[in-house]
Amino acid sequence: MSHQRRASAGRSRRPRLLLGISVLILILLCFLGGGLFFITSIRPDIGYGLQDTLFRKREPLAMDEIAVSESDTESVSLHDIREGKREDILYQNSLWLINAEYPLAEDAALMLTEYKDTELLIDSSAVQSLQELLAAAEAETGDRVYLMSTYRSWQEQEQEYQNDPKLAVPAGTSEHQTGLAIDLYVYQKAQREFITAKAGVWIQEHAHEYGFLIRYPFGKQAVTGVSYEPWHIRYVGKPHAALMYANRWTLEEYVEQLEAGRFYTCQGYGFSRQEAQDGRLQLPKGWKNVTVSADNTGAYILTGEI
């Protein structure tokens, strides 16, 4: 009889325990939801970054390493590529890694051109893609997106840093000095407020389709040395931007993935990061529409359609 009473008491406690746990979970969810709403209203950039990181899944893309024998490659002259003597290979600066560890050389050969009629300078390889990105953003959201800052000289970047060292970086470590980085804004919505615009959100989620990435993404300050900047986009080219977006890689992390001297494929493209040997690179035979870019770490990244 005593055993039956104890068993009955144990069964009666279980529903109360489950109810208590459910109430606790509900309270925690309400607390988290309320906290997220508060953060979103005060710091919309952090609010978006948290939501994107916690709730928006991305399908990772794998780079498959392939074996390429020496007989399957052509030795190409880096000098000839840079001088435009190889019409089948385009030299670019699109994959330069610029940060405190790898500063831009003062005599770096830039490839600048005026963007439309704005008198603003950007890297020539980014012009068409930027036009397509901004046109698509306006068509999809109704917001007109403007260029706030593009290329800056050494003097201009140093002045930016002196004016606001919390936001700007010292001269030589800024991507703006390459013309590959662009700060965007929508009317009355600049910098962190850019993410409150429809176009700001759309660009976060679609810029990679046009060869751009959010160079300083949320949660990656320990890697990039720069806090989240949803308004700052950087041109790298479509196949590279797709890989970085899908895998949530920064440019620093992406360069590390490309082990020097190896060959990779992904979604119809081939990639190889190489250190020049006697001024020459090894280009796999059969690659088409090839581009070569220095990465500013002492190596070059070859990209081609396969």
Image (cartoon, rainbow, N blue to C red):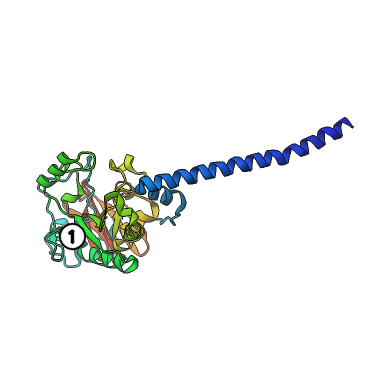
Q: Is residue 210 left or right of residue 21?
A: left
Q: Quadrant of residue 280?
A: bottom left
> Considering depth in this image, is 189 or 225 the residue closer to the camera?
189
The image shows a total of numbered marks equal to 1
Q: Is residue 86 above or below residue 179?
A: below
Q: Is residue 181 left or right of residue 156?
A: right
Q: Position of residue 63 (x, y in %)?
A: 38, 55
Q: Furthest residue to the top? A: 2
> Considering depth in this image, is 186 or 223 the residue closer to the camera?
186
Q: Is residue 81 visible in this depiction of the protein?
A: yes
Tell me which amino acid carries mark 1: Tyr
Q: Secondary structure at mark 1?
A: strand
Number of residues whose C-alpha sits closer than 10 Å to that of mark 1, classed few (under 14), some (14–19) or many (20 or more)? many
Q: Is residue 69 visible in this depiction of the protein?
A: no
Q: Residue at x 72, y 39 (%)?
A: 14
* Quadrant showing the N terminus: top right
* Quadrant showing the C terminus: bottom left
Q: Is residue 255 left or right of residue 153?
A: right
Q: Quadrant of residue 288?
A: bottom left
Q: Position of residue 264 (x, y in %)?
A: 34, 56
Q: Residue at x 53, y 45 (%)?
A: 30
Q: Is residue 258 left or right of residue 146?
A: right
Q: Residue tagged by mark 1?
A: 91
Q: Residue at x 18, y 60 (%)?
A: 91
Q: Furthest residue to the right? A: 1
Q: Position of residue 294 (x, y in %)?
A: 20, 52
> Considering depth in this image, is 28 or 168 the residue closer to the camera?
28
Q: Position of residue 68 (x, y in %)?
A: 33, 58
